[in-house]
Image (cartoon, rainbow, N blue to C red):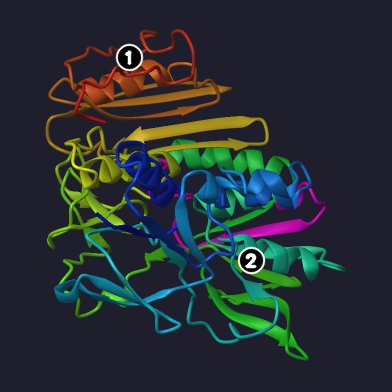
């Protein structure tokens, strides 16, 4: 049986390893747009600051494909999927036949359609090429504007500040990381950033990129303010890499729709990672769980099922953790569903600590911790178990033990 994997990030790599462990003699072919597999975008901003060398940008060594007898086609892109023929077509015209296919193509940054967006110095920070471009052209950069204050924008702002660059964050929503934080948490984050010298502007949109001789010179906002800068980084969101699937028959809904075995609607074709739309185990709604741990687990589940065993992907809900200077923040589940029927909210707040626990009919559905995150392990366990809990105001039941999530003891056949 021939296995083909498209994508070499955490989902693709964990899928390949799961297949190889169960099918040691089967051909496994990996197609990657990157020059080398196992790139780690979460480490890019750390590398930018000089904290880590280039080796830390990869979560597997350079001989990984050879060691696992995986045929690697690097620097190649899939342009078409032909399910009826059981093959994919690459940009060089080569066709690869498969009996099992894993699509793990991830996402790409969204570019804002704003005047001046074609100026030199407008870019993204999603991959190694983006980071290398920034470093190569960073001489003389004193001011950077980041459009978008989500997970990537916040982390990048802190790391650029460490390089003695003045950073301004522009966020069109009324609060920072509006899909993750509530008002109280956003305010703590904003105060932390401002306290370290980072500019933060919420409720405002970038209206125009100003340029001089074709290069970025500033940003004009929707309310007429101008921020001088030599670089603009767009961090407003991502979109799934599914263009090559148009007309293939794969079910798409803001990504590739899969079941709990990571199967698509087409026989023999699986998908995993940021490109997928899975089912939220708390709400039952479809969503895109675009986090590194989710991608790794999804790839593992896909690989196991592709190899002929049966494994289900469970405990699927948002989890985000950030270290912003001296402030640690963690949010999981759906802590912003605090106005839903049957929902109860417990908030405990001190100068250096904030905890919000949200339950529905006695079952935990979400939490936010800021400052002291030592209760995260117990809360994650409660989210996964779906057992009834009692959280009276001021209760310290979840401020126990370690902040490291415990091994949940997954039953055989489940992840």
Residue 285 horizontal/vertical position (percent): 16, 48
> What residue is pinned by disc 1?
393
Establish if 35 lies above or below 59.
Answer: below
Magenta residues, dominant SS class: loop
Report the label total.
2
Residue 318 in view here: no
Residue 34's disc is none
Q: Which residues are magenta?
A: 160-182
Residue found at the far right of this picture: 140
Q: Nearer the viewer, mark 2 or mark 1?
A: 2
235 magenta-colored: no
> What residue is pinned by disc 2?
130
Badge 1 crowding class, 10 Å Cα cut-off, few under 14, some 14 to 19, many 20 or more, is few
Quarter of the picture containing the N terminus is bottom left
Residue 109 in view here: yes
Viewer-side residue, 79 vs 242: 79
Q: Is residue 264 left or right of residue 147?
A: left
Secondary element at image label 1: loop
| Quarter of the image where one finds residue 123 | bottom right
User: Which residue is found at the position 16% from the left and 16% from the top?
Assistant: 388
Secondary element at image label 2: helix
Establish if 24 lies above or below 100.
Answer: above
How far apart marks 2 and 1 lie (CA) works out to 46 Å
| Quarter of the image where one finds residue 361 | top left
Q: Is residue 344 left or right of residue 12?
A: left
Q: Are marks 2 and 1 in contact (CB under 8 Å)?
A: no
């Amino acid at each position: 049986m021939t296995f083909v994997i498209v994508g070499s990030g955490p989902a693709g790599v964990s899928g390949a390893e799961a297949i190889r462990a169960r099918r040691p003699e089967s051909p496994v072919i990996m197609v990657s747009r990157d020059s080398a597999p196992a790139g780690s975008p979460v480490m890019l901003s750390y590398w930018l600051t000089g904290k880590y060398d280039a080796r830390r940008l990869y979560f597997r060594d350079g001989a990984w494909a050879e060691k696992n007898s995986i045929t690697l086609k690097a620097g190649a892109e899939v342009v078409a999927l032909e399910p009826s023929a059981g093959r994919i077509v690459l940009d060089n015209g080569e066709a690869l036949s498969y009996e099992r296919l894993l699509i793990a193509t991830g996402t790409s940054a969204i570019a804002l359609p704003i005047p001046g967006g074609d100026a030199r110095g407008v870019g993204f920070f999603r991959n190694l090429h983006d980071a290398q471009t920034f470093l190569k052209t960073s001489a003389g950069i004193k001011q950077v504007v980041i459009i978008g204050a989500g997970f990537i924008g916040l982390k990048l702002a802190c790391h650029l500040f460490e390089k003695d660059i003045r950073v301004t964050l522009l966020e069109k929503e009324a609060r920072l990381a509006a899909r993750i934080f509530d008002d109280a948490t956003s305010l703590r984050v904003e105060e932390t950033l401002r306290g370290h010298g980072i500019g933060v502007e919420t409720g405002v949109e970038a209206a125009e990129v100003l340029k001089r001789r074709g290069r970025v010179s500033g940003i004009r906002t929707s309310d007429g303010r101008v921020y001088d800068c030599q670089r603009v980084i767009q961090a407003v969101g991502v979109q799934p890499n599914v263009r090559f699937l148009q007309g293939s028959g794969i079910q798409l809904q803001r990504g590739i729709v899969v079941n709990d075995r990571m199967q698509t609607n087409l026989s023999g074709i699986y998908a995993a990672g940021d490109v997928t739309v899975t089912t939220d185990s708390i709400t039952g709604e479809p969503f895109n769980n675009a986090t590194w741990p989710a991608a790794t687990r999804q790839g593992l589940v896909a690989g196991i099922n592709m190899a002929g065993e049966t494994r289900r992907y469970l405990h699927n809900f948002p989890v985000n953790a950030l270290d912003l200077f001296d402030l640690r923040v963690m949010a999981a589940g759906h802590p912003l569903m605090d106005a839903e029927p049957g929902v109860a909210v417990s908030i405990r707040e001190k100068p250096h600590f904030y905890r919000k626990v949200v339950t529905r009919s006695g079952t935990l559905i979400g939490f936010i911790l800021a400052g002291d995150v030592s209760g995260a392990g117990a809360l994650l366990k409660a989210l996964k178990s779906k057992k009834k809990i009692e959280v009276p105001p001021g209760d310290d039941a979840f401020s126990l033990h370690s902040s490291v999530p415990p091994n949940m003891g997954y039953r055989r056949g489940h992840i």
